[in-house]
Amino acid sequence: MMDYQDMIAGLQAFWSQQGCVLVQPYNSEVGAGTFNPATFLRVLGPEPWRVAYVEPSKRPKDGRYGENPNRVHQFLQYQVVLKPNPPDSQELYLESLRAIGIAPEQHDIRFVEDDWESPTLGASGMGWEVWVDGMEVSQFTYFQQVGGIRLKPVSVELTYGLLRLCMFLQRVDHVKNLRWGGGLTWGELQGQFEREYSVFNFELADVDMYRRHFEDREREAAALLDAGLVFPGYDAVIKCSHIFNVLEARGAISVTERTGYIARVRNLARRAAQAYVASREELGFPLLARGKADA
Amino acid sequence: MTTPRGRPFLLEVGSEELPARFVPPALEHLHRRGAELLAEHGLAVEGLRVYGTPRRLGLLCATLALRQPDRTVELKGPPLARAFDAEGRPTAAGLGFARRSGVPLEDCERLEDARGAYLVARRVEPGRPAAEVLAELIPRLVLGIPFPKVMRWGESDLEYARPLQWLVVLHGEDVVPVRLGDLDAGRRTRGHRTLAGNRWLELPAAATYLERLREASVVADPAERTDLIRRGIADILAALPGGGLCREDPELFEEVLHLCEHPTPFLGSFDAEFFSLPDEVIVTALKAHQRYFAVTAPGESRLLPHFISVRDGGTAGLDIVRQGNERVLRARLADALFYWRFDQQRSPDEQVARLAAVTWLEGFGSLRDKIERLVRLVDRLWLGGLGDGGPSPPALARAAFLCKSDLVSEMIRDGKEFTRLEGIMGAHYARQAGEPVEVCRAIERHTMPRGAGDELPGDRVSSVLAAADRLDNLAGCWLAGFAPTGAKDPYALRRQALALLRIVLDLQARIHLTSLIEEALAPFGDLVPEANRALVAGELREFVLMRLAVHLVDGLGIAPEVVRAVLPAHGDDPTDARAWAQALAGFRDRRDFLQLATGFKRCKNILEGQVLAGEERRQTVARWRRGGEGADGTSLADLDEPAERELLAQVAEAVPELLAAEERGDYAAVFGQLSAFGPAIDRFFDNVRVNVADDEIRRRRHAFLREIHALFALYADFSEVAPLEC
């Protein structure tokens, strides 16, 4: 039966064949693959884009010291963005499942309504969670708006929950027993990491320091975006978002404060989105010509 | 005029999977609006039916006319005198009319009516072919489906619930040339995703629709799928050793029905170790997480360690599907069991202590502070009319103390579907800790009613706690500036006020709303300036009265003007207000009552708003008891006109009976008594001039009318229910 890494390799091969550029994870903490500029920025504007990548997603609040069978604070997502969404997006997705050993006719596959919203990114979309035999294995979302900007064309985002999918395929009941590859399990590779980060996020993160970091990064983001530097500016936005997640896990943020913090990140994300579109327009939307030439 | 023959007609809109809840209203729209549009455009249909699955919405007619019927159009031309000259030769006007109407002048008719003789052209307009009309109607019909939410996709500007995939429009054997955005109608539909490999199917004719779909494993008729699911479930239960029953759940059934094109129910099982969990937790995991039906033992409510799920597909690989589903459920239940055990390591009292770390409302303290207020407020409510007359029971204070303890439990903090078990889990944990039945029941029910039509808490202890929780929320949120404005009501205060009122009415409790609102605001004393609190008390009272009015009208079906008539006098006691409103509603159409209401309105008009209010108004009863005198001390004994004396004597004599009827709660009798004054009031206004020149007499008559008005106004503002013309 397929190891974790084989499954990832299977998805990489499949989406590479579909004309996706395979990029690497972003070099900063993100809560989801959507934060990676390869999604957040590239879905904006008219330029065509097809990308796939693995993203280690960090959600401090979800940590359970590595003890919960299904919940961990850092997990890998597999992220695919097709812009514009092709008419056969669903069929492509189902083919990708076949590529990793899930033959649709042998299973019960459902597309169950699940609209998506990220208040932090000013983003929303409509679509489904995909169930395989009752297990939610992917999010399938047609982005309608990102960074407060209405999208045209619309992109589809496919997000595979790799851990879940692999636990399902390997029929293991606890994440620690998942066979990763090279003869090692998830527990052997990630167990200590998960435990220590739970201690850090829930017990030791320095609240005052993180609050200061938030302020600093917020200022930095605004200054960089003012200077027309889209990618460094957006990078500071991503950092704000992660700092907020740590503070929240630490229990340092009240319900009302939460709304305020989210609004601050969203405002910056909006500015980054606008700056990106403006900068691409200035460059004459270079990938637009490429897309037309290929067609 | 002959009716053209028809042919079968099919419209099928193929899309990516629609949300299950979108399908029934969309089909309803296609059916109703489809029939309307076709009728409006003169296309006769027979046997119109609709079909639908998550991937397709279909409208099939046994026959649809080939074309619209021909229509005769009559065009009125110029008068004959202008259309023809003196010699009877056509003029330019006559020839022009013939040209414009397309009817040769010799074929035009001459019509004579009251206004003279005219030229008339009658022309038969041929009906348009159905295809031409349908090409216009179908995009309107399809894009007009009122989905709760629509989206865009790709480069298209269309909006639909999910991306459109295909469009079939067939009239007999012919494709009707309809275009929807960049989608052209054709004859191709798709078979079942897995059972038919999602293959394209060519439909040779509209009439082959259901049959071709069935061959491709799609059961398009929801009624047929319903039947398949029901029979499948019955077979599964029949095969269970010892039998079993499927818990009825229409909402879940409808969702499951529209999550598949080819339903195959199957049985799954879970480990009996999970029976240490409360039933509600298991059922929530089955239903809310997984859309499974729970199975109970026959004739009992006891759960069996099974579930029934409905697969979209056939029996191939069914064991794999079953095992997958069982594994997913096991993970959900294992999560729940972990929470259940973990949570019980802390006693409910310890959990309450932990509430101190949870903010209730920013700047308005923690949940622990809220508990403190609730314990006090339940006692005030109990003694303030919601109780049974005795002191408040210890169980009530205890339940108030523990009712929020589950908010810090892992089960509720899960953030997913178990969160909806708030209150229910608190009750379970309290039960495990040995709390008395009454306490547990009140913890469980204190969140009821959850919605407008939802069940009420029922017993008195639970009801008082539920009412206190709502009243505290109203007070705190209002002080914090979260009063509803327009469509914005972030803390659902309208719903909470309604819940509060429904509970009070359910208990038939006699309360003084203003005092209870003041009680609820009092604990916020340190946080809010005194002046602000008084202002808020007034606003909040108005707000609750407004909700009461809405409830009496919308919930109990009482006429709005009746509610307006009684609320100013009785709104502070909602149960009483309801009784007054019901009594008034039963009375208002009686002739004598209308006479009275008219008389009351005449009083009010002639006093030009100079009426008694507040304490002065309430004291009128005492003055009437003394035989009648003005609020300012004016003696009414000197009234000299016979009609005046008659009215005074009649009212003064009736006051004791009026009060007795009110005391008995016989409000119909009160209105009956008041109605009896109608003729005397009429005679008064017919025979006595109120605004006479003599200051003294005028003053006396005004004082007298003010007393009459005040007495009546104690019961209702009758001018609200008076006939319009007076």
Image (spheres, rainbow, N blue to C red):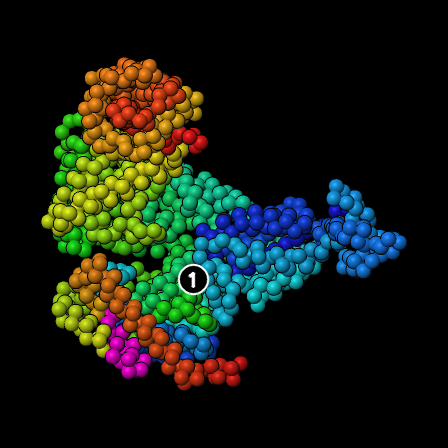
Image coordinates of residue B376 in percent, x first then y, are 13, 39
Image coordinates of residue B391 in percent, x first then y, are 13, 29
Q: How many marks?
A: 1
Furthest residue toward left: B526
B306, B495: nearer the viewer: B495
Residue A278 placement: quadrant: bottom left
* Residue at 38%, 42% in the rendered image: B295
* Residue at 49%, 46% in the rendered image: B229
* Residue designated by label 1: A127
The reply, left or right, for residue A115 in relation to residue A256 is right
* Residue at 35%, 52% in the rendered image: B487
Say which quadrant the C terminus of chain B sits in. top left
* Residue at 41%, 53% in the rendered image: B322
Image coordinates of residue B260 in percent, x first then y, are 49, 53
Q: Is the residue marked by circle 1 packed among few (<14), some (14-19), or many (20+) residues within 10 Å? A: many
- Under mark 1, the amino acid is Gly
The boundaries of the magenta stretch are A221-242
- Say what secondary structure mark 1 lies in: strand
Asked whether residue A233 is drawn in magenta, I would say yes
Instruction: Assign the magenta stretch its main secondary structure.
Output: helix
Inspect this view and state whether residue B429 appears: no
The reply, left or right, for residue B256 in relation to residue A192 is right
A35, B218: nearer the viewer: A35
B248, B443: nearer the viewer: B443
